[in-house]
Image (spheres, rainbow, N blue to C red):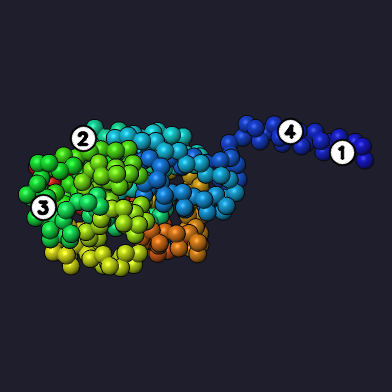
Amino acid sequence: MKLFSRVLAAVAALAGAAALVAPVRAQDYPTRSITMIVPFAAGGPTDVVARIVTAHMAQTVGQSIIIENVVGAGGTTATTRAARAANDGYTLITGHMGTHAAAVPLYPKLAYHPEKDFEPVALLAGTPILILARKDFPPQDLKEFIAYVKANTAKLNAAHAGIGSVSHVSCELLNSVLDIKPTGVPFNGTGPAMNALVGGQVDYMCDQIVNAVPQINGGTIKAYAVATPERNPSLPDLPTTAEAGLPAFQAQGWNAIFAPKGASPAVVAKLNAAASRALDDENVRKRLLDLGSAIPNPQERSPEALAALVHSEIAKWTPVLKQASN
Ligand code: ASP
């Protein structure tokens, strides 16, 4: 009996030593906390979506998922860091239409390529774009907004989250449709940009709906239109750009999780399943829907669907942005 337990102890010690040196097997993943890089400041749409979804994913994978906000250069600083991180599934990024599509034509020396340097994991949310302004901005509706910004372009400040961010590229599109060139004011995310809009330090902004709904409902900012074909259920009184007289301005952002290239398919599948489970959770759904986001249906959540989205978004935004910046 004694001998038997000694043998067992020796086997256990050997197994323990082996565990220290053996690479983590995908079926054991994750054995420690995961870092989720958010490429913008806390409180903005990307941060909010990432926090809502990863809080639920953490329960599913049984490890904490720590959000790290890494700001700068329209989200491309953080995305470069994520592209160069170890591909062991412990560093991920919540990217968006800017970092993983629009940045490609806007940064000729971009240090990563969204398709070559990442494994798509899961689409988390579609985020309609709104035209927003400080609450005392004179125009009362979109028609007045169009006339006002055309007449006052030289003195206007438009806030955005850096070159290539969703707020930047969608207002680039708006400004090119209206043929105006306001002064752009970059922030580290549209969390801080929203604070400046609420404080009246900037005039207008195009942004993902997520951090705007509470401000619009609270009357701290103005919203003129949503740039999607349908009205948004979270803001039923807000007209679409087509209804309000500017059908040429259509824009929708999205947020999605990516892992560095080479992450194992089993790890990607585990993360994808956890994200999808979060998107099926009643509480998570309610929080995302209340903030105006669109929840991807199950077919839109696969890594393959995300790869196709990234590909089509790069193809879509490249000519638009090249033309807008001329
Ligand atoms: N919505 C922002 C953008 O304009 C970034 C953020 O999430 O703060 O890209």
Tell me which amino acid carries mark 1.
Answer: Ser
- Residue with the mark numbered 2: 108
Q: Is residue 199 left or right of residue 319?
A: right
Tell me which amino acid carries mark 3.
Answer: Tyr
Which label was assigned to residue 63?
A: none
Which label was assigned to residue 14?
A: 4
- Residue with the mark numbered 1: 5
Of residues 300 and 225, the one nearer the viewer is 225
Q: CA distance from mark 1 to mark 2?
A: 65 Å
Question: Can residue 15 be seen from the camera position used here?
Answer: yes
Cβ of mark 2 under 8 Å from ligand 1: the answer is no
The answer to whether the residues at label 3 and label 2 have Cβ atoms under 8 Å apart is: no
Tell me which amino acid carries mark 2.
Answer: Pro
Q: Nearer the viewer, mark 2 or mark 4?
A: 2
Which numbered disc, 2 or 4, marks the residue that appears first in the sequence? 4
- Residue with the mark numbered 3: 148
Q: CA distance from mark 3 to mark 2?
A: 34 Å
Cβ of mark 1 under 8 Å from ligand 1: the answer is no
